[in-house]
Image: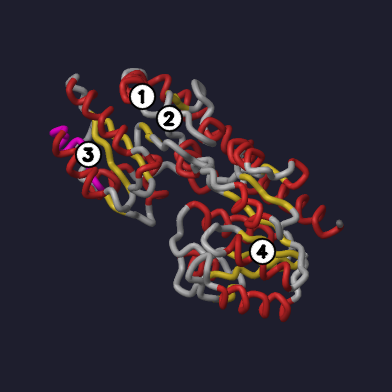
């Protein structure tokens, strides 16, 4: 098969990483791929590093009609069997139109669980033969927007479990983040925006510190709420108990060094960060929101509580702080589950089956 992938995101967050996982695996199986992405984007450099063919097309967003025109021309020139649009910023609306103009079948992946006006959703998804949801939660949102079941497919995101198989360098981690020996360390990773729920995690940390529990939280990520979250941490007198580490492209190197991974999102398509934590043998605590309930098996690979319930979140963290054996059991169960249910091989096979069905029809 010859597949053209459209990924217009600027940063190398979870979505573009999934595209690189998928395309690299497809190439190993003999399929021909090209990734269309903006020059200098995260997907651009990551794809090139994997030896993936890249075509750079600048995209300013959903209203960038010249991008749709240039993409249509490129599709006409290269004649792929199928176009797979991966991101919402320009790729789904304009990518779908371009594929339609070029008369090439197209599919789209949806990674977020937020809703929208039904009319907008109808227009957004009309050009696509299939809409791939990365979780059942997202599929349910799409059904609520009027997308017929016959056009829906659930293919969950994957994690490269093998990348987390080796023991992490704890000495380097402690030096890098100035963590004293014996400190219980919890991490959270994600954009510092409202729906990621960091304010609730800081409140829970404040409760734990008030009980005299020696715990440190390292927050990875950047975003518009950073100043507000820093102010909240100061008001709670958290001091060195919380560390704002910014965005790190080497986080995967250190994720296995944490005792616990927190994911307090209020809305989440699936939660790739939680997949990585579990692949590294780290239990997850967080809110049972969106696809997180599918990514984390509550009671087996982590503990999930009701969204916004900071008391319950603090209690869940405290339970796992006090039970080394249970954390070890959850970590081991997480590793197994990621290998068996969230592998790149499984994700790739499901995509190939879907591509075949679309092309043959």
Q: Which residue is mark 2?
A: 287
- Quadrant of the snapshot with the N terminus: bottom right
Disc assigned to residue 254? none
Toward the viewer: 151 or 347? 151
Q: Which residue is mark 4?
A: 96
Q: Which residue is mark 1?
A: 309
Q: Residues within 10 Å of mark 4 (few under 14, many from 20)?
A: many
Q: CA distance from mark 4 to mark 3?
A: 44 Å
Q: Residues within 10 Å of mark 2 (few under 14, many from 20)?
A: many
Q: Where does the magenta region start and end?
A: 236-244
Q: CA distance from mark 4 to mark 1?
A: 40 Å
Splitting the image into 4 quarters, where does residue 97 fall?
bottom right
Q: CA distance from mark 3 to mark 2?
A: 20 Å
Q: CA distance from mark 2 to mark 1?
A: 8 Å
Residue located farthest toward the right when viewing the structure as drawn: 360
Depth check, mark 2 against mark 4: the one in front is 4
Disc assigned to residue 242? 3
Left or right relative to 219: residue 145: right
- Mark 2 and mark 1 in contact? Answer it, CB < 8 Å: yes
Q: Earlier in the sequence, mark 4 or mark 1?
A: 4
Above or below for 46 versus 304: below
Mark 3: secondary structure = strand
Q: Earlier in the sequence, mark 4 or mark 3?
A: 4
């Amino acid at each position: 098969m010859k597949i053209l992938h459209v990924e217009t995101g600027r940063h190398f967050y979870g979505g573009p990483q999934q595209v690189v996982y998928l395309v690299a695996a497809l190439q190993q199986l003999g399929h021909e791929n090209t990734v269309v992405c903006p020059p200098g984007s995260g997907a651009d450099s990551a794809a090139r590093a994997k030896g993936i063919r890249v075509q750079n097309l600048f995209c300013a967003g959903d209203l960038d009609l010249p991008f749709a025109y240039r993409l249509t021309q490129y599709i006409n020139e290269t004649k792929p069997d199928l176009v797979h649009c991966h991101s919402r910023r320009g790729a789904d609306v304009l990518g779908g139109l371009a594929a339609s103009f070029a008369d090439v079948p197209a599919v789209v992946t949806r990674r977020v669980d937020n809703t929208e006006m039904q009319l907008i959703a109808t227009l957004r998804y009309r050009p696509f033969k299939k809409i791939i949801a990365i979780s059942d939660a997202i599929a349910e949102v799409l059904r609520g927007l009027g997308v017929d079941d016959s056009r829906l497919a659930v293919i969950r995101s994957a994690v490269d479990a093998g990348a987390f198989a080796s023991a992490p360098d704890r000495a380097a981690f402690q030096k890098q983040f100035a963590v004293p020996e014996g400190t219980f360390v919890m991490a959270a990773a994600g954009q510092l925006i409202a729906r990621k729920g960091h304010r609730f995690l800081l409140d829970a940390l404040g409760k734990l510190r008030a009980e005299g529990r020696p715990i440190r939280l390292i927050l990875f990520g950047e975003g518009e709420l950073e100043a507000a979250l820093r102010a909240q941490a100061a008001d709670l007198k958290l001091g060195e108990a919380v560390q704002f580490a910014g965005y790190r492209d080497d986080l995967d190197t250190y994720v296995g060094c944490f005792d616990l991974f927190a994911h307090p999102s209020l809305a989440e398509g699936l939660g790739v960060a939680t997949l990585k934590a579990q692949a590294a043998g780290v239990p997850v605590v967080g809110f049972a929101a969106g696809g997180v309930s599918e990514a984390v098996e509550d009671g087996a690979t982590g503990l999930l509580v009701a969204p916004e319930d900071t008391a319950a979140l603090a209690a869940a963290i405290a339970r796992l702080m006090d039970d080394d054996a249970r954390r070890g059991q959850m970590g081991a169960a997480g590793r197994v589950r990621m290998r068996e249910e969230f592998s790149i091989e499984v994700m790739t096979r499901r995509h190939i089956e879907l591509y075949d069905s679309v092309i043959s029809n």
